[in-house]
Image (cartoon, rainbow, N blue to C red):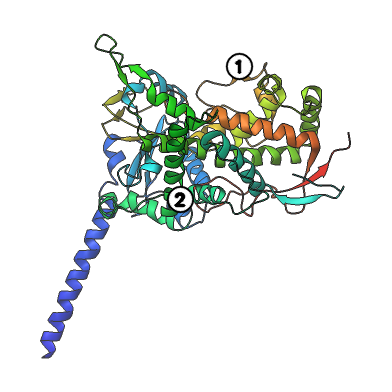
Amino acid sequence: MGVWDVVWSYSDWLLILGLLLLAAHTYATWNHDFFSKKGLPYTKPWPIFGNMGKAVLKRASFADVLLGMYRQHKGHRVNGMFQMTLPITVVNDPELLKRIVVKDFDHFVDHYSIIPPEVDPLFAGNLFFLKDKDVHSIEMKDLFTRFTNDVIASTAFGVTVDSLKNPNNEFYLAGKGLTNFEGLRSLIFMGYTLCSGLMKFLRIPFTPLEVSKFIHSLVKDTLRTREREGIVRPDMIHLLMEARKERVSDGVNGGKTAKLDLTDEDITAQATVFFLAGFDTASTLLCFASYFLALNEDVQDRLQAEIDLVFDDEVTYETVHSMKYLDMIISESLRLYPPVIAVDRVCEKPFSIPASDDQPAITFNKGDLAWIPIYCLHRDEDYFPDPERFDPERFSEENKKNIKPFTYLPFGLGPRSCIGNRFALMETKVALIHLLARFNLKVTDRTPIPIRLSRKGFNVGPEGGFWMGLTPRNK
């Protein structure tokens, strides 16, 4: 081979490499003018990573990334951002938010699902014994998660487990697998965001295979056993089995009724919704509420006085409902650290807001994605003065009426709000009543002050875990 042949050979490869790089860059940036075409403010995205680069590279938490963009575009009704290559309109204005989630709900009926239901129907188809006086430093997230695991196993699936005595029981391990969004699951999520067609073709599920098999098998066996033996239990599975027997009106055609078409897969997916709400949402809320109580001993003392006044070893619905100060503490904990950073809506039919004196017109086309930045609204000083301070008095009977509507929405609002929120709240309150009736929460040298949010995955929590101390109360 002559010298010129070698040169031309290298030139061919360089040309091919250049074309591949050009194609990759074009693919990664082809829609970066999405918001400029609409005349909307947006944060300039990186190729491939969009505005999630710092979160993906673990240089910042997802919550801090979203809060930074929210503050960057303060004063604008909406701002644009990119989740990898996916353009998202972030709705910052409470009045516009109200229209999307309530008034004009028919334009934004559904949540967005990156994971196709035909690939992963389970994910996409859903709706303490201390005896001495020393301060024991405990990682509260693990402790509370074991408690919530046992509660959800019983109330949703009718299964009795004891995750303190049997720490590696199959139900607990399934819950950990279902709620762990780090590592491989994070990469799979990125894959569906960047090249959903390829991931769908390969049928790569988001839910770990062993977890999916366990939950499907558990629900299927439970349904068959109960149908065969006529077993009735006061749990989620029984309610869904009863719902499958009901006839419902279609609301049109003269109110014709039809049997509710609930398949075993539907029942499995809906039970999983409660699994997620009860397993991780409640345990995380318990951790943050306990953290603030440990840091604010005056608040803890007042709450314990309220508990001592009404609690007599048995917790009833009426008892929980009567505890106003407990409700204030839970509400303020949810304001500072809501269970989800943002919720989404997909535009189902065109929707527009005309321009105002200083704001551009806003247009949503079918398929456009809107985000509601809950974490950011909760930390906006225009709605919550001194927003970083823990202050349960914001939610007193006198003060909560001053909260601007649609600025406090820890579980979302409207017909698509979290269906498991009441369950998670009740579970949290009952646990705190029992805990604080017997123990004091203390700060230890391992307690994170201030909290720095973990940059791993999408779950909200501090770096290093929730370390606190427990001492028995002397009553």
Q: Which residue is mark 2?
A: 211
Say which residue appears at 88% left-offset and 33% top-offset: 475
Say which residue appears at 58% left-offset and 21% top-offset: 403
* Residue sitting at the far front: 229
Q: How many residues crowd mark 1 within 10 Å: few (<14), some (14–19), many (20+)?
A: few
Res 167 visible: yes
Nearest the eye: 299 or 91 = 299
Q: Is residue 437 above or below residue 442?
A: above
Say which residue appears at 68% left-offset and 47% top-offset: 140
Percent of width and height locating residue 365: 26, 31
Based on the displayed image, in which of its 4 quarters is residue 319 positioned? top right
Q: Is residue 275 above or below residue 9?
A: above
Q: Earlier in the sequence, mark 1 or mark 2?
A: 2
Q: Which residue is mark 1?
A: 401
Name the quadrant of the N terminus: bottom left
Say which residue appears at 79% left-offset and 33% top-offset: 437
Q: Residue flagged by tag 2: what amino acid is it?
A: Val
**On the rendered structure, is 445 left or right of 33?**
right
Please say if the residues under marks 1 and 2 sit with CB atoms less than 8 Å apart. no
Based on the displayed image, in which of its 4 quarters is residue 21 positioned? bottom left
